[in-house]
Image (spheres, rainbow, N blue to C red):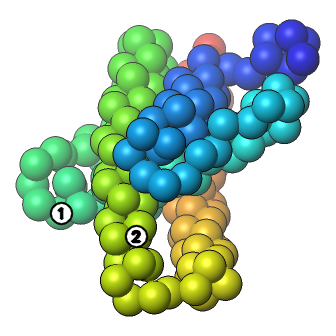
Amino acid sequence: MKDLLDKLSSYNLFNYLLPGVLFAGLSKYVTDYDYIQENVVIGVFLYYFMGMVISRIGSIIIGPILQWSGFIKFAEYEDFVKGCKVDERIELFSEINNTYRTLISLFVVLLLLRLHNCIQVSWEITPRTSAIIGVTAAILLFVFSYKKQTKFVTKRVDIAKTTPKEKSEKK
């Protein structure tokens, strides 16, 4: 288990595992659900997955809403990539930025889960219906995540094609 945890990057720890653990721990106080696992191995994988889902919600829903509202403004992606070659701390600050967005997403998800508890009782939604809605939402979330990641890869390839070779070898 220690070897597995050693292989996780700081990004994975702060944007997937930490939010997943916080979600599992807080959800039993905020909602009627208890996601705490007795088995440590299963717990680590479950918390990591929960954190990944929370992070994707932040990336696909929360981030775009904040950007659309004008609350935040991103640099052009090409400028970001070129800036990272000049100042390597930009990537660290971007990682911290993503952690904040993931934490916002964590609290939004906890709030929505609490609202789900209330609606499920008052509307008499069955657990099976809730599961179907949840799986459908997860499919859509990861389809859009895949699309977004593919767009980033494509942009980086395009930037790499137009960057002189000696500059791209420095990084």
Q: Residue 44: percent from the left, percent from the top?
A: 76, 31
The answer to whether one can see residue 11 in this image is no
Callout 2 amino acid: His
Q: Nearer the viewer, residue 32 or 8?
A: 32
Q: Residue 7: percent from the left, percent from the top?
A: 81, 18
Q: Nearer the viewer, residue 83 or 118?
A: 118
Q: Nearer the viewer, mark 2 or mark 1?
A: 2
| Mark 1, secondary structure of its residue | helix
Q: Residue 49: percent from the left, percent from the top?
A: 69, 46
Left or right of 116? Residue 165 is right
- The answer to which quarter of the image holds residue 122 is bottom left
Q: Earlier in the sequence, mark 2 or mark 1?
A: 1
Give me the residue at 18% from left, 46% from top: 73
Q: CA distance from mark 2 to mark 1?
A: 26 Å
Q: Nearer the viewer, residue 9 or 45?
A: 45
| Mark 2, secondary structure of its residue | helix
Left or right of 46? Residue 79 is left
Q: Which residue is mark 2?
A: 116
Q: Which residue is mark 1?
A: 68
The answer to whether one can see residue 30 in this image is yes
Q: In the image, is residue 71 above or below residue 148? A: above
Give me the residue at 58% from left, 31% from top: 21
Left or right of 67? Residue 79 is right
Number of callouts = 2
Q: Residue 110: percent from the left, percent from the top?
A: 39, 50
Q: In the image, is residue 143 above or below residue 113? A: below
- The answer to which quarter of the image holds residue 10 is top right
Residue furthest left in the image:
70
User: Residue 11's mark?
Assistant: none
Give me the residue at 61% from left, 70% from top: 138
Pointer 2 local density, CA inside 10 Å: few below 14, some 14–19, many at least 20 = some
